[in-house]
Image (cartoon, rainbow, N blue to C red):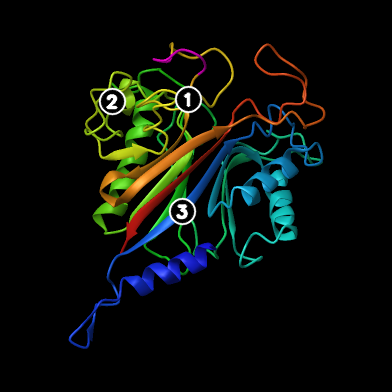
Amino acid sequence: MTLARRIAVAAASALLVLGGTTAPASAAVNTTYNLWTWNVGGAKLHAGRTTDGLIDAAANSIVNRDADFAAFNELCQSQFNALITKLRALGWPADTTNFARFTASSEAGSCAAGSAGEPFGNAVFSKLPLLGAQRWTLPSDGTAEQRSLTCVAPTAQPKVHFCTTHITTSNVVAANGKKHNENQLDYVLDRMEDFNTAGDTALIAGDFNAQPHYGRLNGWYSSTLNVANNSGNTGAYRELDDNDSGNCLGYGEWTATGTPGSTPPCGGLAKIDLIFARQSRIVGGYSGDSLSISTACTGVAATDDYPAGSCSDHRITIGTVTVSVG
């Protein structure tokens, strides 16, 4: 069932007729979303290339996973443009002219593509047409990169916001006494809570550069999540893979290659690509997963962390959740 059809069915089921009186048009409806996120290393691994297999791998995955929203981190501007073209060709967006937004986080020249180079940043794509994006610059981590939070809302669902961000790795203490990564996480969380206070439903996916059991995410994870692999939480959100008892309950499945910042509670590699929904908005179950990294990207050399041809040093992360909207 398409997203538009799911919305129509949910809206129809929410109209309760009692004694000939229908419920208000603003009555909440339950809608299911398939979410998708990937840090592609568009500059580091691909040098801005658009013909080495990355675009096909990403677009095909979005379509094959029936994603309603997709988020990218470290995507070069030309790669963003190429994805628009490819997703149009695959027939994914309902409106081929209004389904994608890009936010640069680096200076022009960070990607090698083009005669003068180009920036990289974050991007969001939506199966349904979009209102204008909301963009915030995160507190500085002392570097030239301006990390951001970008949120979009479909025109047909203005009370739903899909967001992406890419948090710094910096543990340097800022002037306020907190580390840069903590300040950025707090800032993003405040924006998510602003949506909730306004009566809206916000979903966020991206590279948080923090493992689920890290203390700096305690303010994110719901206090109802209190297991051996993830405890001490004080927040209001659930990460869509935190109920994965088959891999690591409370933590989920790994998403990033390379040596973890600290040993994951169940061993192995680190999970830093996360998808959050506020627990008070979740209706019923939810699930998350990470997908094996394609090795079909030509021109990507092998390292100690990944084999030749790897399309990223991160896994695609997906999730499905039903939320109350309105």
Residue range corresponding to the magenta coloring: 264-269
Disc nearest the viewer among 2 and 3 = 3
Tell me residue 268's x, y (percent).
50, 14
Main secondary structure found in the magenta portion: loop
Residue tagged by mark 1? 271
Q: Image point 35% across, 54% down: which residue? A: 323
Q: Residue furthest front?
A: 246
Above or below residue 113? Residue 129 is below
Q: Image point 42% across, 15% down: which residue? A: 266
On residue 33, the disc is 3
Q: Label 3 amino acid?
A: Tyr
Q: Is residue 309 left or right of residue 102?
A: right
Q: Label 1 amino acid?
A: Lys
Residue tagged by mark 2? 176
Above or below residue 81? Residue 166 is above
Instruction: Looking at the picture, tell me which residue is in the foreground, 292 or 261.
Output: 292
Q: Label 2 amino acid?
A: Asn
**Earlier sequence position, callout 2 versus callout 1:** 2
SS at badge 1: loop
Instruction: Looking at the picture, tell me which residue is in the foreground, 59 or 176.
Output: 59
CA distance for labels 3 and 1: 22 Å
